[in-house]
Amino acid sequence: MSLKTALTNFNSGENPELSVLDIGHEDYLAIVNPDSAFWSLCRKDKLADTLTSKKFNESLKAKLPSFNKEMDTLRYGLLPSAVYFNPTERCNLNCQYCYIPSELRKNGVHMDKDTIIKSLAVLKDYFKSVITDGRLPSIIFHGSEPMLNKDAMFAAISMFKNDFDFGIQSNATLIDDEAAKFIIENNVGLGISIDGPDAKTGDSVRKDWNGSGYFANVIKVLEKFRDYPRFNVICTVNKENMKTLKKTVKFFHDAGVKVCMLNTLRCTQESSRSLKPDEREVAKYFIEALDYSHELYKKTGRKMVVANFANILLGILAPTARKLMCDISPCGGGRSFFAVSAKGDMFPCSEFIGLEEFNGGNIFKDKISDVLDSARFKLVSQRKIEAIDHCKTCAIRHFCGSPCPAEAYTMNGGMDKRGAFCEFYEEQTRYAFRLIADGRENDFLYDEWDEGIKEVLTDKDLK
Ligand code: SF4
Ligand code: SF4
């Protein structure tokens, strides 16, 4: 046989670029086409055969245009369907890692009831032109602490309950029985923040302006929402609480929580950076906590989804099925959603509130479509992973997305820099691939996550 006919065109000419990723598994490696987010797991002893397999290369090459199109739609073709709405600038707590500047949280403004109603009317009109398939756009009342402006917020929810899918993200200090009743009766989504399994950990960073913690009050809210399906809990992972993550998972699971997030803190503000955990160390505790959530599931038959990790897993298994929009580049900020401040100013994401250079315009003065198209919004909505050093050659760039642009900008010096937790994303991605290699991925995902999802390239096509 001549040399010419013996060779396949793996990684050359017009053939798919293939990277090999060590996923930390005893038997498997991942083969990735980074641009399209295609991947395949490969036994280590079959790696050379697979990479040089004519069938593998040709099948992939034939499918690549459709994979690339899918990624392009996800990255550039989405229109906004959600708004993070801040009905107040104020907060009754002074958490050290908060991304809203403390001056705003302490002395900022409330939006009055009529102004919230006027804003929602503007948003309703806008969404009529962009969502035409009958889905309801989402409004998530967000913070600072939205419950400080409860009466105005609840009045607006009552008025627009057929026009939006509402959610509230709260520190839970002000949710009494009456508020809980309203939230449940109006089918409003609720996310609350709890940073640990006990007062010592939970209150270590989350304190009010006088230094008092609220753990004891906040955990009462868990009981009120135990059976409410639209409820989740967020734990912001930092240097102080990372070692208790496993206990936190147990605590949430015992309380009946069905969906939680174990999000590493954002380092957008200088004040939060001193709480940034070591990336390798936090990855270790995070993965231990995921393993433990699985153990609890097997023991009790009750699954608790860790939503931020489920999103990474979904991004690998079915890129367009992911629910959160941080782990994709460009991220969802300023394109699939945007934020409205208590003054009506529009920012690509709440993470940018307080950074005036990202204020794209005002909901009462400017056309929403013009704001989305503004140079200030485009800094975020057109931040591409291909322009970021390290990320542009990273095999997992479309499973990570190099979040967060706000951190990249304030902490690392520009939109063309990485965010704060590169190694943490690497480890999560490796862990996700290991679960897939061991056939355990469904145990970490929402039930029925794959409804309506079609396999387009199977093992049989590639071998
Ligand atoms: S990556 Fe940052 S800016 Fe983008 S959606 Fe997530 S929090 Fe917002
Ligand atoms: S932040 Fe790190 S893991 Fe994520 S794409 Fe960039 S280099 Fe890869």
Image: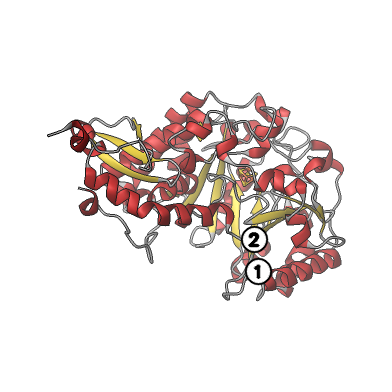
Judging depth in this view, the residue of 153 and 386 nearest the camera is 386
Image-based side of 315 in relation to 51, left or right: right
Please say if 43 is above or below 452: above
The quarter of the rendering in which ligand 1 is drawn is top right
The reply to whether residue 77 is visible in this rendering is yes
Residue at 67% from the left image edge and 64% from the top image edge: 178
Q: Residue at x 45, y 32 (%)?
A: 426
| Side of 136 relative to 61 (left or right) | right
Say whether residue 382 is left or right of residue 329.
right
- The amino acid marked with disc number 2 is Pro
Q: How far from the left and from the top, in percent, is residue 246?
A: 43, 35
Q: Which residue is mark 1?
A: 130
- Expressed as whole percent of the image width and height from the top left, the position of residue 89 reads 80, 48
Tell me the quarter of the image containing the N terminus. top left
Q: Which residue is mark 2?
A: 80
Amino acid type of the residue tagged 1 in the rendering = Val
Q: Are marks 1 and 2 in contact (CB under 8 Å)?
A: yes
Element on which disc 2 rests: loop
1 or 2: tag closer to the N-terminus: 2
Q: Out of 255 and 135, give the one closest to the viewer.
A: 135
Residue 245: x, y in percent?
47, 34
